[in-house]
Image (tube, rainbow, N blue to C red):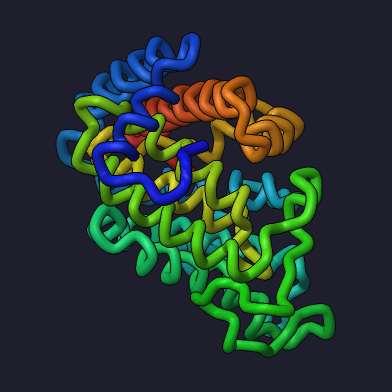
Amino acid sequence: MPDRNPTRDAIVDQLATLADLPGIRDKADAVREACTKLRFHEALRRRIPEAAAESRVRGARASAVLDGVDYPLDLVRELTTGARPWPDDLSPDLATLKGAIAATAESERVASIVRTAPLQALARLHVAAASPFVRGRDANLTDDTGTLGRPRVAGEDTTEFVDLGPAPDAAEVSQRLAQLADLIVAASTATNRVPAVVISSIVHGEVIAIRPFAHGNGLVARALERALIQALGLDPTGVAVPEAGHVANGAVTYTGSSAAYGKGTAAGVGLWLGQAADAVLKGVAEGERICDAVRVGRLG
């Protein structure tokens, strides 16, 4: 985990040190090679929008799964495309799915600003992820729209990622988000020294560790990872499905390695970076399957 209040050069130095943890650069090289191969898939010569749209459908479903909500892919696709309407009253599970779909869709739009205005991107992703919860009419949901897009303030807590222990208080959240923004801006100019998958994984892990919002932290963290993978040029087409890779690694691996990352030790950070790189690699394989289906006209 990067130190507090470093200069831009120091941030890059720290990230490069993390990238040099045992086995991480080898994994990053494998991810880069796989993404390069995916970029030149025959289906992407003319049909990138179709493949990217399906990636977002599968990514949203997988992100919801990591929040404990599992719906069939066909249903998620129908809800995403509007082929099936959303019910007027959303259950908590459907609100989670709707938030996952919205945040994953928003990740493509914030990819253009995430390197230069990361906190704006984070806010927009939270509005997308949490809106179904604060605007639902189900008795289990809230109507506090004032929480949308802003970090927790004094007196507000979160019950998410309890395995990490107590969430940072509001003052620490503010400080760490400012540091995270500095990290993203600095690292975005130094992908020659720090692999893009390391940057996106560190940011993903930091959002989970900080838990800046009362609700939706996991959905936001995964959407931000997706946006950075695209914005940093690792997967510029947005066809890989990193969320599906995290599901393939297993929920226990995901929560356990994120908790290990939160401890800030070299071993814990290395564990998280390793599983995150594995997840992106599996997400690229899922992207290849999407491209194969698009090429032969068998998507959905």
Residue 41 in view here: no
In this view, the residue farthest toward the right is: 139
Q: Taking 251 as reference, is 24 above or below it?
A: above
Image quadrant assignment for residue 257 = top right
**Picture coordinates of residue 63 (x, y %)?**
59, 48
Image quadrant assignment for residue 251 = top right
Report the residue at 73% width, 87% height from top.
137
Report the residue at 27% width, 51% height from top.
185
Report the residue at 36% width, 47% height from top.
183
**Picture coordinates of residue 180 (x, y %)?**
43, 53
Left or right side of 55 for 87: right
Left or right side of 205 for 183: left
Report the residue at 50% width, 70% height from top.
128
Give the mark count: 0
**Picture coordinates of residue 233 (x, y %)?**
23, 37
**Picture coordinates of residue 75 (x, y %)?**
62, 56
Residue 267 in view here: yes
Q: Nearer the viewer, residue 66 or 77?
A: 66
Q: Nearer the viewer, residue 10 or 148?
A: 10
Q: Nearer the viewer, residue 139 or 72?
A: 139
